[in-house]
Amino acid sequence: MSCEYSVLIVGACVVIIPAADGAAHYKDLVDSVLLAQLIANKKIEKAPDVDWYNAYVEFLDDYWLRRTRARQEWLITQDSVESVSDWVIAAISQGAVDKGGATAATVQRLARLSGNEPAMGLLRDHMQKISTDESGDVLAPAKAVRLLVVIAQTPTSLTSVYIELKTRQIISANPLAQRHLAEDVQGSVCMRYASADLSGILYGPVRDAIALKIRDRYQDNVAMLTLTDDASTMEICAAD
């Protein structure tokens, strides 16, 4: 059975696109999502109290016009064991995502991948920033874990789910599958949900400048993950 979706890892973001379209059609989406993350990362490096997601969407809102947005926070209850993929699938189920069942199945397949997949390593490194002098299984203080999942049914329309939590645990080889206990998470889990459309009028004049700005950042931030029935393959995406 052929896969309905292809997956690109873009920093801390899983971008899910229709397999029939090809990644090249989604270059504007990938470029803008990547630059928005780089801007947010730079802002929290300078001011750690900055809300990462707000910094991320502050850039995107200049070109992607949000139709819907929602925020939810919750505490993991005692004796409960939950994963990031569970939360993403729940958000997809609650939202008006076209072909939500197929999208959720794609997330489930990602959660079953081996943590040895290079693309999983790329995603893990961006989801939780660990300095070279931090080792072992426990961090002090707790570090943020951030994941974006962007579902793109067309090159100019997207739905996104953002999950953020703080933990003293170093995330596992496949962070989508890691099971979180209440005692492992500091404070609440935060979920942001949004849908948006790209404005060609607003983005067109800056398209080339954005592409030039992130051209040399693809190697360390972007990989394409092709899911098959038996395995997955990963390749680094090169800028045009």
Image (tube, rainbow, N blue to C red):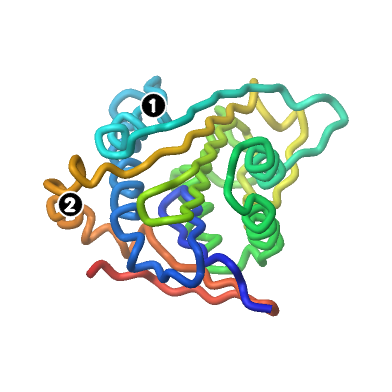
Above-or-below relation of 224 to 231: above
| Location of mark 1 (residue) | 54
Above-or-below relation of 199 to 11: above
Above-or-below relation of 37 to 45: below
Q: Position of residue 77 (x, y in %)?
A: 80, 25
| Location of mark 2 (residue) | 207
Q: Position of residue 123 (x, y in %)?
A: 50, 54
Q: Quadrant of residue 90?
A: top right
Q: Quadrant of the N terminus?
A: bottom right
What's under tag 1, amino acid-wise? Answer: Asn
Q: Outermost residue toward the right?
A: 79
Q: Is 239 left, or right, of 119 in this rendering?
A: left
| Pick the front one: 40 or 155 | 155
How many numbered circles are shown?
A: 2
What's under tag 2, amino acid-wise? Answer: Arg
Q: Nearer the viewer, mark 2 or mark 1?
A: 2
Q: Is 20 left, or right, of 80 in this rendering?
A: left
